[in-house]
Image (cartoon, rainbow, N blue to C red):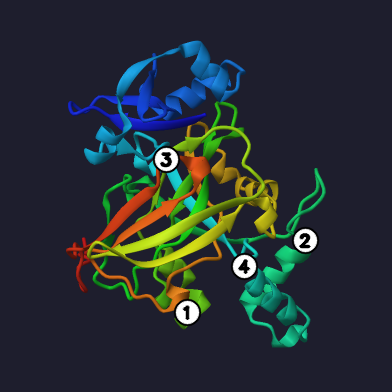
C-alpha cells in the first residue's frame, strides 16, 4: 500500500491511497499524522486502519502532481514539532567502491581518515544480532519541518552556499505515540539536498553543509522495506538528461541495520515527545558531485524507484537573502 497527502484547489487536506493513476481518498482523516495516531490508539496496523476507515474516489494522481498539490507524505501542523535528521556512512555503494573500501580497511588504523574509521565501525558492528546494540552511525540535524519543500517545488539555493547537490536516499517517517513510543509510519524517497563543496573542505563543516532544504515523497510506502532496492537518480538541464546513475538501498546494501539506525536516533529522550513527527534520511552512496557535476538554478532533480511509485522531482531556484552581516540587533 502507498499513501499520499494532498490538498484541493480550495486548500482542503486529504490522505489518499494510490490506486493506479487515481487516488482513493481515505475517509474521516485530514492528515497522515492524524491517521497514524488513530492507528496507534486503535492498536491496529496502518493498512488495517485505512481499510476500516474506508475510501472514496478522488482526483487523478497526475492532476495533483501537475498542480503541485501533493504534499510531503507526513508532516506536522506546527513545523517546530517535525524534526528532520539523518545518518551518513551507512551504505556500501557499488561493487568497485566496496572493494576499494575493503582494501583501505586493511590499512594501518593510524592512516585512516575519521570518515573511513567510522565506516569501518559500521562494517564491523552496524548489524548486531536482534536485541543487541550496534555501532553508532554518523548523525546529523537538518532542520525542522519548515525546511521541507513539497514534491515538484524548487529548493532554495542560499547566496552563501558553495554547492547545491542532490542526495538520493530513503527516509523513515515516524510519529511518537501518546506514551512516548516511536512508531514507523512508513518509508519514502528523499532528496537530502546538501552543500558538498563546503563539506569536503573539512568534515567539521558537515553540520553547516546539511542546513539546507530537502524533500521526500511523493508517496509513503506502508509495511516492511525490501532488503534490496535499486533506483535511479537523474539531473535534467534544458530539457536534456545531464547526469544519470543507479543508486542502491535496503539492508543488503547497507552496513547498518535499520533497527540499529533507529535505536541510535530514538535513544535520546528529547526525541520521544508525544505527537512529534520525525523524518530520518538513511544515507546514500551515489552523488553527482562525486562525478564532477556542478548544478545550477534551473536544473531539475528526479529520484525514482519502482517500489515507491511516482518519482520525486524538485528543482533549484536562487535564494533572496533575508539576513545580512551585522543584522543582529541589540535590545
Residue 202 point in image, percent of width and height:
49, 81
Query: Mark 1, mark 4: which one is toward the viewer?
Result: 4
Counting residues from the start of the chain, the first of labels 3 and 2 encountered is 3
Instruction: Decide: few, some or many residues near mark 4? Use Cα within 10 Å; few <14, some 14-19, many ≥20.
Output: some
Counting residues from the start of the chain, the first of labels 2 and 4 encountered is 4
2 and 1 marks in contact (CB < 8 Å): no
Q: CA distance from mark 1 to mark 3?
A: 31 Å
Query: Mark 3, mark 2: which one is toward the viewer?
Result: 2
At 82% from the left edge and 49% from the top edge, which residue is drawn?
129
Query: Mark 1, mark 3: which one is toward the viewer?
Result: 1
Res 142 → quadrant: bottom left
4 and 3 marks in contact (CB < 8 Å): no
Residue 101 point in image, percent of width and height:
68, 76
Q: CA distance from mark 2 to mark 4?
A: 20 Å
Instruction: Decide: few, some or many residues near mark 3? Use Cα within 10 Å; few <14, some 14-19, many ≥20.
Output: some
Q: Which residue position holds label 2? A: 125
Q: Which residue position holds label 4? A: 94
Q: Is residue 231 above or below residue 53?
A: below
Kindly state the secondary structure of the residue where label 1 is placed: helix
Q: Nearer the viewer, residue 209 or 124?
A: 124
Query: Mark 2, mark 4: which one is toward the viewer?
Result: 4
Query: Mark 4, mark 3: which one is toward the viewer?
Result: 4
Q: Which residue position holds label 1? A: 200
Kindly state the secondary structure of the residue where label 3 is placed: helix
Instruction: Decide: few, some or many residues near mark 1? Use Cα within 10 Å; few <14, some 14-19, many ≥20.
Output: few
At 70% from the left edge and 75% from the top edge, which residue is drawn?
99
Q: CA distance from mark 2 to mark 1?
A: 26 Å
Counting residues from the start of the chain, the first of labels 4 and 3 encountered is 3
Which quadrant of the rendered structure holds the C terminus?
Answer: bottom left
Kindly state the secondary structure of the residue where label 4 is placed: loop
Amino acid at each position: 500500500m502507498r499513501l499520499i497527502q494532498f490538498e484541493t484547489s480550495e486548500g482542503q487536506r486529504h490522505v489518499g491511497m494510490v490506486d493506479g493513476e487515481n487516488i482513493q481518498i481515505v475517509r474521516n482523516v485530514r492528515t497522515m499524522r492524524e491517521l497514524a495516531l488513530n492507528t496507534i490508539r486503535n492498536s491496529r496496523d496502518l493498512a488495517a486502519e485505512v481499510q476500516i476507515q474506508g475510501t472514496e474516489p478522488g482526483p487523478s494522481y497526475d492532476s495533483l502532481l501537475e498542480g503541485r498539490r501533493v504534499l510531503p507524505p507526513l508532516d506536522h501542523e506546527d513545523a517546530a514539532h517535525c524534526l528532520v535528521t539523518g545518518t551518513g556512512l551507512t551504505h556500501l555503494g557499488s561493487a568497485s567502491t566496496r572493494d576499494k573500501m575493503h582494501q583501505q580497511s586493511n590499512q594501518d588504523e593510524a592512516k585512516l581518515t575519521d570518515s573511513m574509521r567510522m565506516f569501518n565501525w559500521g562494517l564491523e558492528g552496524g548489524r548486531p544480532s536482534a536485541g543487541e546494540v550496534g555501532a553508532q552511525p554518523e548523525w546529523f540535524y537538518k532542520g525542522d519541518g519548515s525546511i521541507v519543500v513539497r514534491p515538484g517545488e524548487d529548493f532554495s539555493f542560499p547566496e552563501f552556499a558553495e554547492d547545491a547537490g542532490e542526495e538520493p536516499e530513503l527516509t523513515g517517517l515516524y510519529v511518537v505515540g501518546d506514551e512516548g513510543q516511536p512508531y514507523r509510519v512508513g518509508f519514502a524517497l528523499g532528496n537530502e539536498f546538501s552543500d558538498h563543496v563546503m563539506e569536503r573542505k573539512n568534515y567539521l563543516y558537515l553540520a553547516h553543509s546539511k542546513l539546507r532544504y530537502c524533500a521526500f515523497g511523493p508517496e509513503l510506502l506502508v509495511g516492511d522495506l525490501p532488503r534490496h532496492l535499486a533506483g535511479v537518480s537523474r539531473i535534467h538541464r534544458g530539457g536534456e538528461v545531464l547526469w544519470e546513475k543507479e543508486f542502491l538501498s535496503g539492508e543488503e546494501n547497507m552496513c547498518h541495520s535499520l533497527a540499529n539506525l533507529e535505536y541510535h536516533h530514538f535513544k535520546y529522550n528529547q526525541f520521544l515527545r508525544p505527537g512529534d513527527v520525525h523524518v530520518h534520511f538513511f544515507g546514500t552512496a551515489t552523488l553527482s558531485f562525486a562525478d564532477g557535476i556542478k548544478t545550477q538554478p534551473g536544473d531539475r532533480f528526479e529520484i525514482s524507484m519502482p517500489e515507491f511509485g511516482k518519482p520525486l522531482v524538485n528543482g533549484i531556484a536562487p535564494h533572496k537573502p533575508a539576513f545580512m552581516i551585522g543584522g543582529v540587533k541589540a535590545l
